[in-house]
Image (cartoon, rainbow, N blue to C red):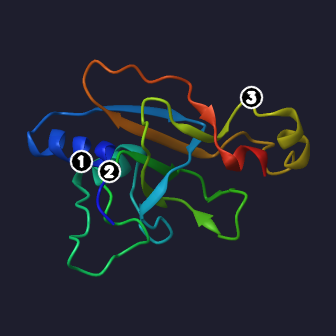
Amino acid sequence: SELGGVQVRYLQLVGEGVELLGHLEEGWDLDGLAVHWGIGHKQATAKDCEAACRRFKPSPMDEARTAPFSRLPCNTWTWCGEEECWEPDAHHHTRGDCWLKFTELPETPEVNMRLPMLPRYVKRHSRELSRGVPWTAGVLVEPGVKVTNGTWGPRAYW
């Protein structure tokens, strides 16, 4: 499929050498389309994960994909800084896992986890969240764009 306007704009900015601003938060897990699978994609720090997002080059249209959404650019990332990072999915996440993602509105990201969570989510996952949200996440935005608290993504209701 062809790239949409948001993807084209982002690639245009990067191609023009615009230095996108990074917004990082500890205790934050963001949703997005995985452009590079995080399990086994280890980075030493959250800033290294952000740097990996900045360096990511989408798969060309005439080549095989390296991930389901690898033809999209990276503008969102999530990094595991604990020995294990819980996520309401079937995977085992460990220190250094760096998920590179794309979201259409990085300035208003879809939030998977951030305290305070929705009460029913905390009740359902109280053991897993007893030490807080183990993830650190961030977005890349154009200069002058303000990052909001975002909206709850679908995983915030699991």
Q: Position of residue 33 (x, y in %)?
A: 47, 57
Instruction: Pick the quarter of the image with the N terminus.
Output: bottom left
| Disc 1 to disc 2: CB gap under 8 Å | yes
> Crowdedness of circle 1 by 10 Å Cα count: few (<14), some, many (20+)?
some
Residue lying furthest left: 16
The x, y position of residue 67, in whole percent, is 40, 72
Residue depicted at 81% across the width and 43% down the height: 130
Tell me how far mark 3 sits from mark 2, CA to CA.
Answer: 34 Å
Task: Kindly identify the residue that appears in the image at 50 percent across and 51 percent down.
Answer: 32
| In-front residue for pair 3/112 | 3
- Three-letter code for the amino acid on which mark 2 is drawn: Gly
The structure residue drawn at horizontal position 33% and vertical position 76%, both measured from the top left corner, is 65
Residue 58 in percent (x, y) is at: 26, 62
The residue wearing badge 2 is 4
Q: Residues within 10 Å of mark 2 (few under 14, many from 20)?
A: few
Q: Which residue is mark 1?
A: 8
Which mark, by number, is residue 116?
3
- Residue at 80%, 34% (x, y): give it: 118
Using the rendered view, name the quadrant where residue 143 is placed: top left
Which mark is nearer the camera, 3 or 2? 2
Helix, strand, or loop for circle 3? loop
Q: Is residue 40 left or right of residue 12?
A: right
Q: Nearer the viewer, residue 39 or 84?
A: 39
Give the SS element for disc 1.
helix
Amino acid on which disc 3 is placed: Pro
- Distance from disc 1 to disc 2, alpha carbons, whole Å, reads 6 Å
> At which x and y percent is residue 20?
24, 34
Q: Quadrant of residue 62?
A: bottom left
Mark 3 or mark 2, which has the lower sequence index?
Answer: 2
Circle nearer the viewer, 1 or 3: 1
